[in-house]
Amino acid sequence: MSAWSPEHPDALDQLNQRPQPRPKVAVHKFSSCDGCQLAFINAGEALITLSQLVDIVHFAEAGPLDAEAEVDIAFVEGSISTPHEKERIEQVRRQSRFLVSIGACATSGGLQALRNFNSHSAEQWTQAVYAQPAYIDSLETATPVAEHVKVDLELWGCPVNARQVFAAIRALLFGVMPLIDKDKLCVECKRRGNVCVLVAKGEPCMGPVTHLGCGALCPAFGRDCYACFGPAENPNTHALARRFVGLGLLPEEIAHRFHFINSHTPAFRSAGLEWAE
C-alpha cells in the first residue's frame, strides 16, 4: 500500500508513522585550539538531547569519524592556515547544505592571524622555530573560512558559547536563518546591571566596540573586555582609541588592544594599524 486513497484511509497514517531520516550534522576542525568544539561537549545533557534529534556523523573530538559525509549542517572551527586546509574547506563546502563557522579562528583568523602583520615569511618563521622545517607546510597568512568559501552563518566568540550553537541548530532545522543580536557588549552589561569598568574604574575596556554574546563575563567580575566576540556593528574604534589615550595607554598598547584575538577583521585591523605606526 504505497499511497493514500479513499478506499484505504489508514494508508496516510501508516505513511506518517514511517521513520523519517534525521538531519546530519558534522563538526570539522581546522587550525585552532579545540575550544569551540568543547562548547559542544561542555553542553552535557543538551548534547545528548541533540544526538537524539540529529545524526552527528563527524565530530573527531567526541568520537564519530566520517569527514566526507554529506550533511545538512557543517560546523567549522579554526582558521585556514595550510594548503591542505584550503583544499579541505572547499570539500566541506561541497558536501554541506549549511556551513556555519564558529569561533574567532573560523570567523576572523583568530590569534594565528597575528602572523599576517609580520614582515617575515612563513618559511622564515618555520626555519626559526622548528628543528626540521621541511615537514611544515603553511600558507603565508592565516585567514577566516569566509575568505575561501561561502559561509551561511558566522557565530563569533573565543570560544563560541553553546547557547549560540544550539539556537542556530534549532533555527536551521526549522528552515530559517538564526536571528543574531548585533548590539554592543555595553548593552549586555546594562542588562546585567554591571558597573561600567571603563567609566568607574578607568580600565581600557573594549566593550563599546565589541559584539555581545559572552554574557559580559569579564565586566561582570570587574575586568575589562578583551573583544573576544569581535567587532560590533558600526564600531567607533577611533573614539574608543582616543579614550584609551586619556587613560594613559601608549600607542603600541592601543594597537595591541585591537590586534589581539580578532585582528584580521577590517575594523580592528585598520584601528590597530593606525596606532601601530
Image (cartoon, helix red, strand yellow):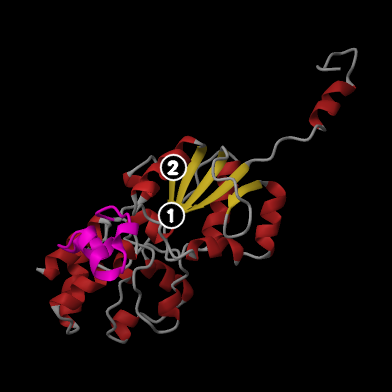
| 181 relative to 91, above or below | below
Q: Is residue 40 magenta?
A: no
Q: Is residue 151 visible?
A: no
Q: Is residue 153 visible?
A: yes
Q: Which residue is identified by label 1?
A: 30
Of residue 105 and residue 217, the one placed in the foreground of this image is: 105
Please report the bounds of the magenta region as a residue range. 113-141
| 167 relative to 43, above or below | above
Of residue 123 and residue 217, the one placed in the foreground of this image is: 123
Residue 63: image x %, image y %? 63, 57
Crowd class of label 1 (few under 14; some 14 to 19; many from 20; radius 10 Å): many
Mark 1 secondary-structure assignment: loop
Distance from the alpha carbon under mark 1 to that under mark 2: 18 Å
Residue 213: image x %, image y %? 45, 63
Horizontal relation, residue 11 to residue 191: left or right = right
Q: Which residue is identified by label 2?
A: 152
Residue 253: image x %, image y %? 20, 78
Identify the residue at image location x=17%, y=84%: 248
Identify the residue at image location x=16%, y=76%: 252
